[in-house]
């Protein structure tokens, strides 16, 4: 590790349970982030700043004026650009030591599985249930940890799934796969709420990669920002889950 890296990451290297070994683990790790909206903006910026070795960014969309209220990785001058390109430029300006791979397309199931297998951790930062379920299925099949976040209105949630654990996967939470969910385009969202959840996703990614602390594996974290209340629910694996259940083993 160079003197520049030691100085850049010195504040987290000072953590007793992190140290240089933890920083080296981050530098050798690759993270796949699906979605460069409000959640993905916070996740990507914090992970790049923390010194992740490589980030693969997946998003098919382009920057729109309505995005800028919460998607802080993009700028007004980026309107009309592919989000992954805008995000790549911001991240490299923040930390040129991080390798950035931009994938400006929607991945099919085969491509998603291939990308998941290349990653050490996958971050679900998308905004719709079908994509979340597809990401979850790919991670379970690939045996790769998943950090999934969601935010709408003044509410947010966070779930971590790890292979070999007893905690629920995302499909366990939604046993009726046909259920439809609202989007922020329909109901709105308070900008800092996605930042809070995205920041926490970054925390969980770092913990999964370095062994720091205890992850949310098997627990669902819920935020009610209107009352500023947090709840943590134990979410054991559903034995009949079509993705991670006993019959799929």
Image: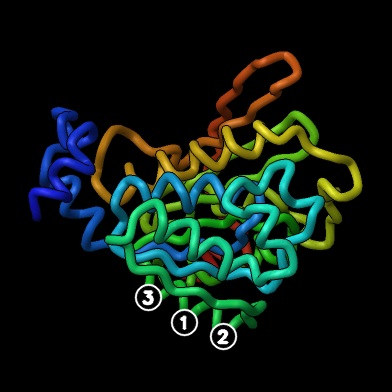
Q: Are marks 1 and 2 in contact (CB under 8 Å)?
A: yes
Residue found at x 49% / y 57%:
90
Q: Position of residue 209 (x, y in %)?
A: 29, 51
Kindly indicate the quadrant of the structure image that contains residue 241: bottom right
How far apart in space, not on screen, are marks 3 and 2 (Cα)?
Answer: 13 Å
Farthest-out residue, front: 77
Q: Which mark is residue 110?
A: 2
Q: Which mark is residue 8?
A: none
Left or right, residue 140 beside residue 176: left
Residue found at x 46% / y 61%:
122
Q: Position of residue 5 (x, y in %)?
A: 17, 50
Circle 1 SS class: helix
For label 2, the crowd category at 10 Å Cα-Cα, with few meaning under 14, some 14 to 19 and many 20 or more, is: few
In the rendered image, is residue 19 in sight? yes
The residue pinned by badge 1 equals: 114
Q: Are marks 3 and 2 in contact (CB under 8 Å)?
A: no
Left or right, residue 197 beside residue 141: right
How far apart in space, not on screen, are marks 1 and 2 (Cα)?
Answer: 6 Å
The residue pinned by badge 3 equals: 118
For label 3, the crowd category at 10 Å Cα-Cα, with few meaning under 14, some 14 to 19 and many 20 or more, is: some
Kindly indicate the quadrant of the structure image that contains residue 127: bottom right
Q: Are marks 3 and 1 in contact (CB under 8 Å)?
A: yes
């Amino acid at each position: 590790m160079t003197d520049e890296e030691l100085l850049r990451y010195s504040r987290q290297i000072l953590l007793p349970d992190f140290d240089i070994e933890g920083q080296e683990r981050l530098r050798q790790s690759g993270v796949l982030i699906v979605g460069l909206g409000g959640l993905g903006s916070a996740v990507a910026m914090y992970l790049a700043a923390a010194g992740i070795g490589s980030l693969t960014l997946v998003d098919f969309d382009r920057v729109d004026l309505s995005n800028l209220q919460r998607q802080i990785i993009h700028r007004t001058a980026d309107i009309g650009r592919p989000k992954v390109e805008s995000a790549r430029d911001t991240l490299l300006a923040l930390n040129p030591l991080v390798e950035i791979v931009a994938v400006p397309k929607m991945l099919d199931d085969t491509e998603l599985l291939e990308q998941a297998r290349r990653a050490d951790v996958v971050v679900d930062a998308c905004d719709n249930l079908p994509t979340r379920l597809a990401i979850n299925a790919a991670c379970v099949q690939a045996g790769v940890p998943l950090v999934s976040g969601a935010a709408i209105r003044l509410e947010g949630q966070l779930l971590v799934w790890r292979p070999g654990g007893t905690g629920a996967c995302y499909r366990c939470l939604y046993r009726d796969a046909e259920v439809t969910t609202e989007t922020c385009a329909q109901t709105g969202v308070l900008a800092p709420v996605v930042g809070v959840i995205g920041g926490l996703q970054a925390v969980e990614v770092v913990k999964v990669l370095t062994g720091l602390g205890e992850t949310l594996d098997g627990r669902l974290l819920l935020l009610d920002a209107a009352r500023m209340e947090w709840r943590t629910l134990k979410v054991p694996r559903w034995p009949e889950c079509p993705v991670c259940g006993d019959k799929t083993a």
